[in-house]
Amino acid sequence: MSDSFDLLVVGGGINGAGIARDAAGRGLKVLLVEKNDLASHTSSASTKLVHGGLRYLENYEFRLVAESLREREVLLRNAPHIIWPLRFVMPHEPTMRPKWMLRIGLALYDRIGGKMSLPRSKGVDLTAAPHRGVLDERLTAGFEYSDCWVEDSRLVVLTAKDAEERGAEVLVRTECTELERSDEGWAATLLSGNSTRTVTARAVVNAAGPFVDKLAKIALGQGTPAHLRLVKGSHIIVSRRFPGEHSYIFQQPDGRIVFAIPYERDYTLIGTTDLLYEGDLDHVEIAPEEIAYLCEAASRYFASPVTETDIASTYAGVRPLYEDNATNNSTVTRDYVFELEADGGAPILSVYGGKITTYRKLAEHALEKLGKVLPIEGEAWTADAPLPGGDIPQADFAHFLFQASARYPWMPPEMLRRLGRAYGTRMHRIIGEATDLAGLGRHLGGTLYEAELRYLVEEEYARSADDVLWRRSKLGLHLPAEAQESVAEWFSAQD
């Protein structure tokens, strides 16, 4: 194992994983380190959308929206197992944005990204099925448009996995505690459990998300020149509120929007909020006022109110946004900004902002920045490179699943679909030569068997029950307490 690298990337969220993958694919020797689990902070606490950001048009962020819509096409093509289209229904609320404004905004949204594969927007009658009886009867008309769903934490893990398969070293539960700079490079001290390791790198990427200033202080003795605004976004998961696979987008009196999205078959995901955050970055939780806000926001539109008793689970994360001095947290730019510091010796690139949808393009731009101070020979390559499991012919997931059902007729359809959605073509590596469920090893509960746990440990950096139940999957919502305890015991037995 080498201790000398071209690039040390600190931060195992979507930006760090994306930069590590792109750099490794260009021939750089890359080390990616994450102090917790991959996607354990902001990147697993999103609204789980690959989207252009319809509301960003109001803030005149046309470049960001156009780039996001183009990237939506790229990601949908390269990861069709974990990304799929959704139709969003926006009821027209007469007391808020006028109908003409919504129509013009959606027409621009349909076209600003260029040629798109998804259906364009159109008007919708809310007095007909499937909306009648679901929405408040005052809502009679609206619009619908296309965007995409993404399994956010799986996107991070698969991106990191691809980086590793292209030569990068990926270390989880490894914290960068010291960075010492010279003209030639950086010496980094890495702490993993009770053991330390010192590595050198010609350049550092600070992709630590909400911790970006903390790492900058370790490296430079002070925060970065750019300013950071930490904005918390929280979500509630409630019992299923409506049939169908469409989602709703609800305008709010404060100018914000709130999504209501079908989630994990039995639930509806409602979010998000925008609150300035100054608390403990390692322990971010939804606040009572956020719960009240989201319940009220959804109840304003649904025929039946959403109450705290409906909540099955919650999650919250902190967005590390670039401070553009916007007066409202909701209008702070979601675009990404780089701060390259190379005057005092070896370069360090700090990353601010960004969104899941644009992570691949962010990585390309990061390598362009680094290319000014670090020899990089390879060209951009990720636009046509499927993520692990995403090499599905014609990106046709339905046909892929049909073929898998013929190959594994003994597997329950619910389990087959879950494995297909999570692993794509790599589900075959989990199933191996099994010809029945018993061939997958010990049954932990629900659709989870030991063969999958072993794969997640050996191939996807899982080190604990939470890694599996809440990030590699969302089985934590479905498995009873005793089954979750069985998973925890399984991990304990591996130590």
Image (spheres, rainbow, N blue to C red):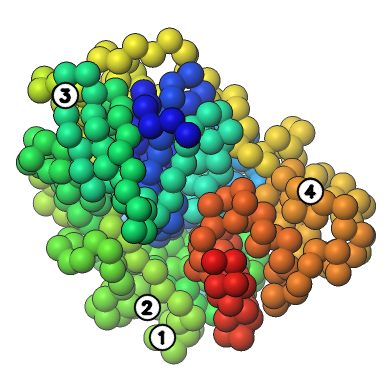
* Residue tagged 2: 295
Decide which of tag 2 and tag 1 comes sooner along the chain.
2
Q: Which mark is residue 364?
A: none
Decide which of tag 3 and tag 4 comes sooner along the chain.
3
Which mark lies nearer to you, 3 or 1?
Answer: 3
Location of residue 19 in the rendering, given as x and y in whole percent from the top left corner = 40, 32
* Residue occupying the far bottom of the picture: 309
* Residue tagged 3: 182
Residue at 55%, 72% in the rendered image: 492
Cα distance in 3D space between marks 3 and 2: 53 Å
Callout 2 touching callout 1 (CB < 8 Å): yes
Location of residue 276 in the rendering, given as x and y in whole percent from the top left corner = 17, 61
Q: Is residue 383 above or below residue 316?
A: above
Residue at 60%, 27% in the rendered image: 385
Location of residue 378 in the rendering, given as x and y in whole percent from the top left corner = 47, 13
Callout 2 touching callout 4 (CB < 8 Å): no
Cα distance in 3D space between marks 1 and 4: 42 Å
Q: Is residue 98 above or below residue 61?
A: below
Decide which of tag 2 and tag 4 comes sooner along the chain.
2
Q: Residues within 10 Å of mark 1 (few under 14, many from 20)?
A: some
Cα distance in 3D space between marks 2 and 1: 6 Å
| Count of marks placed on residues | 4
Cα distance in 3D space between marks 2 and 4: 41 Å
* Residue tagged 1: 307
* Residue tagged 4: 428
Which amino acid does the dot numbered 1 rest on?
Answer: Thr
Decide which of tag 3 and tag 2 comes sooner along the chain.
3
Q: Nearer the viewer, residue 144 or 148?
A: 148
